Structures are given as C-alpha cells and as structure tokens.
Image: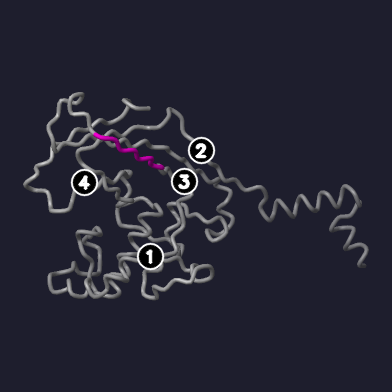
Amino acid sequence: GEGSGIDIFLRLNRSLIRPGKRGINVMIKQPQQWSDVVRHVPHEAHTKISLVPRFTVTDERTRSVTPEVRRCIFGDEIDNPQYKNLPGFEYWVGNCRSRCHQEHVIDLCNCSPSIFFPVTDKDNFTVCKASDFKCLYDNRLTFSIERHPEENDFVNNPFKESMICDCFTSCTQLIFERIYSTTSLDYNETNTETGSMRLEIFYQSGWIIQYQTTMRFTFVELLASFGGIIGLFLGASLLSAIELAY
C-alpha cells in the first residue's frame, strides 16, 4: 500500500524545461525488459503509481503442443520460427516486439539506431549514421504503427504501411498492471519549492495473483483413456478387433 514503496521528490530546473513540456516520462519495467510503456507524469503534482503484479505459469507438459496452439513460447525454444529476442535478454513479449521493430528498420534503412535498440559485436548490420536519418524520417509512419498479422480479418485499418509483428507471450512471465492517480502537490506538507514534483510507486497489495495453464490431456493420454472406456463398457480391445477381423 501507500508508504511501502519508493517515494521520490524531484526539483526541476525551469531553465532546462522545453516550452510546452510539463513533466517527465516514466517507464516501469523489469531488468530483463528492453523497454515498456512510457507514461507522462506532470510536475507540480503528486503522482501515485500502484502496481498490481500478475504471474503466469505454463505447465511443462504443454510442450507436447506447438506454440501456435498454446499461444506462448518457452525461453529455450530458440529454434522456433516465432522466437524473436534481443541479444543478452530473456524472452519476453516486449523484447520480441522490439526485435521485430528493429528488423523492420534494418529492412527499410539497412541500419539500426543505437538509441532505440541494443547493438552487439555479433550483429551483421551497421549503426545508423547521420546520413541515414532521412530514411528514418521518410518511413516514420511505418515505424510508428504496429499491426498483428490477423488484424485485417477483424479491423479495416487505413494504414497499409506498418510494422507487422506476431509475438507470443512468454510461458512464464511476471507483468505489472499500473494504476496512476495525480493530485496537486501540497508544498507546506512536503516542504518543497515551486517547480518540484513528487512520485510515489508502491504495490497495491501484499499478495500476488498467479495464473496457471495446464494440459488436461495429451493425445496419447486421450487415446489411452478412450481405449480404457471402450474396454470397460464394451469389453473390446485392439486384440479382440484383430481376432474379429480374422
């Protein structure tokens, strides 16, 4: 609850604030995430961010079906065509999307901007230079829109040029839902000066919700169960069927 997390006071230098910009951008993510949703937080305000964790676990027995069926990927399934990840990071749907975005930039501009995507010595592409900025600008509309491959079946999207990414969630993942609330800053209570801001981040509760996906039946188990039921109620078996045929 409130008072159990991080309580930050920031004093902003007004001479460095861009005209029309009031506040800062806040990103809450895990260490193995490259990026996540950015939220603008205004200054001269008290902003509270409560986190609601959601933990999802998938049974190992689900490996008997394809990722397309279970709609998730295990971190060690690197040979699967749907597996996309950033080097040095654990598999996560956000990292997969970032890798997909990077591939679109490389495909159109033959380079990768290092300020947006990580670059390693093993990469076979170059870092974008000043001469490549025109290509990035010319394709800015494509780079700003992401679509799902099956989106056209349900939505009439007017943006034909866009990034298409089909990323599965991780079979074991921890995500945080965020709830933002902003009130005016009480300068007498906080003993701060005008131009400051207060940011409070905490867990909404002391417990966590866990979702678990399990395999009810594999094909072999279903076949064995069906055969057992047939044998119990009809007295039939594979051997009796062969004897009947002969």
- According to the picture, the residue beneath numbered tag 3 turns out to be 172
State the SS at label 3: loop
In the figure, 160 relative to 69: above or below? Answer: below
Out of 194 and 238, give the one closest to the viewer: 194
Q: Residues within 10 Å of mark 1 (few under 14, many from 20)?
A: some
At 21% from the left and 24% from the top, the residue drawn is: 189
Q: Nearer the viewer, mark 4 or mark 2?
A: 4
Residue displayed at 69% across by 54% down: 220
Horizontal arrangement in the rendering, residue 217 relative to residue 105 (left or right): right
Label 2 neighbour load within 10 Å: few <14, some 14-19, many 20+: few
For marks 3 and 1, give the CA distance.
24 Å
In this view, the mark in front (1 or 2): 1
Q: What is the secondary structure assignment of the residue under circle 2?
A: strand
Q: List the single residue furthest toward the left.
A: 15
Q: In this view, does 92 lie to the left or right of 105?
A: right
Q: Do the residues labelled 4 and 2 touch (CB within 8 Å)?
A: no
Q: Which amino acid does label 1 sit on?
A: Glu
Q: Which mark is residue 210?
A: 2
Task: Verify whether residue 26 appears in magenta.
Answer: no
Mark 1, residue position: 146
